[in-house]
Amino acid sequence: MDDIRRKTVKAVLSEGAALAGTKVDVKGWVRTRRGNKNVQFVALNDGSTINNLQIVFDLSKFSDSELKPITTGSSIHVQGELVASQGAGQSVEVQAEELEVYGTAPGDYPLQKKGHTLEFLREKAHLRPRTNTFGAILRIRHALAFAIHKFFNDKGFYYFHTPLITASDCEGAGAQFQVTTLPLADLPKDEEGRVDYSQDFFGKLASLTVSGQLEGELGATALGLIYTFGPTFRAENSNTPRHLSEFWMIEPEMAFYEIADNMDLAEEFIKYCISYALEHCADDIRFLNDHFDKELIDRLKFVIDNDFVRLPYTEGVKILEESGKKFEFPVYWGVDLASEHERFLVEEHFKKPVILTDYPKEIKAFYMKLNDDGKTVRAMDVLFPKIGEIIGGSQREENLEKLQKRVDELGLTGMDWYMDTRRYGTVPHSGFGLGFERLVLFVTGMQNIRDVIPFPRYPNNCEF
Ligand code: ATP
Ligand code: MN
């Protein structure tokens, strides 16, 4: 092989015309090989783009036995001249001059043909990143993560790292996984027969976090504007297409923001992320649009171009009650809305994303700011077509006495560190949590959240 610098498939295709006539060096995995006894065409992909680079092997230069190992899934290194392509579907192709096979992929390679079902690919989750579909999803996922950091950084927010292992059991957002080094078959017990956590690794009961918010508030009341972006764990047995046991959450928290500022930020943020993906992942989104969801691009543009509806919970419940629609779960003031209710408001009634506000205090977390009516709190959930809840947030109760009252009513303990934010220099503040995979689900148009994270964790599934 000549000493030429390797280029990615993406670089070769985008530089295209400028490189024509020069010798290029490319490496990747073979997607397909076809042809006749004079010429063989290989579609090469290296993960840099959804598009393949066509490599042409002239059988007067390469023998059958040299080409034999080049089957779907094998990995190769090729040098050759980049030329304008005569065939349809690509503007340039490589006329192979030299070939090195890194690794063969025998006939039992599971991803032989195109068009495997998503269910089949979920069984082969360790290999599915090599498919067009998962390549596209994972590149979009990356772009969205990058956009999130860019959005907040450009606005002067600080990335604040909250702990994954927590001793606070008051996060209240969901059932927790316990973290322990105690011998489970022989647990140390105290006099009352309860597990003696003083002998555990941290000297007390510890769990994986269900939300970084409470610690995030410590950051916001010091740095002003912060966001978290990290793994989150929930042990609910929710076998739905929208829940994972391990997912990533983005939680901005802003000092001096009231609920309207919070809603403005959430709407701007989510529109920014979608625009970023449309601009930077055009090929991947087009692929998903064409293969899975013909309305995807229209739906993404629609969300960017339209104001979200802002509606108090009480009015939302009224609309649901008056809709005459038969819901599986009953609707009445005070009920925690189910996904079918949220989706009715978004998909059938308003046909737009909806930010629902001012929920009954009983169905929301203790830290949300109580309204003057004494019954509702300044919560805001952003509800999206196809997804339901994508963001949950609120203005926080900054008044020490009111917050203490809620803490006492609910019998929460061990909150002293949190109450110090209200005890010393308390300020109005707000924040929200965006489930990263719900955003990726929306932007990719996929139906199941297990298909938008490389290694999904859900009840009875913890592979790799
Ligand atoms: P849901 O009602 O949909 O179960 P939640 O109200 O329990 O969600 P929050 O505690 O408000 O969720 O969490 C903030 C955001 O995190 C949600 O709006 C959602 O986008 C995301 N989220 C929550 N639970 C999960 C989960 N199990 N898997 C993936 N994302 C989740
Ligand atoms: Mn919520």
Image (cartoon, grey):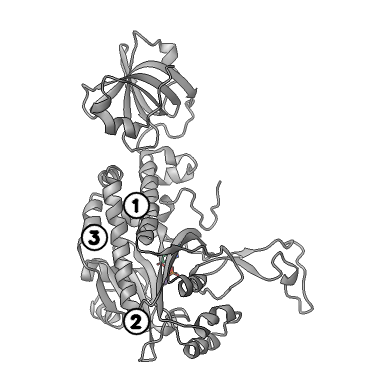
Q: Which label lies toward us, 1 or 3?
A: 3
Q: CA distance from mark 1 to mark 3?
A: 19 Å
Kind of residue at disc 1: Met
Kind of residue at disc 2: Asp
Label 1, on which residue? 446
Which of the two residues, 242 or 58, is positioned nearer the viewer here?
58
Compared to 285, does 336 lie above or below? below
Task: Decide if ligand 1 comes within 8 Å of the CB at mark 3.
Answer: no
Where residue 226 sits, quadrant-wise, is bottom left
Residue 241 appears anywhere in the view: no
Q: Which image quarter has ligand 2?
A: bottom left
Label 2, on which residue? 358
Q: CA distance from mark 3 to mark 2?
A: 25 Å
Asked whether, in this view, residue 82 is left or right of residue 230, the answer is left
Where residue 133 sits, quadrant-wise, is top left
Asked whether, in this view, residue 298 is left or right of residue 34, the answer is left
Q: Residue at x 48, y 64 (%)?
A: 160
Residue 304 image label: 3
Kind of residue at disc 3: Ile
Asked which secondary structure carries label 1, the reply is: loop
Q: Which label lies toward us, 3 or 2?
A: 3
Q: Residues within 10 Å of mark 2 (few under 14, many from 20)?
A: many
Compared to 204, does 113 lie above or below? above
Q: Residue at x 38, y 20 (%)?
A: 79
Task: Decide if ligand 2 comes within 8 Å of the CB at mark 2.
Answer: no
In the image, residue 382 lies at what x, y percent? 33, 69
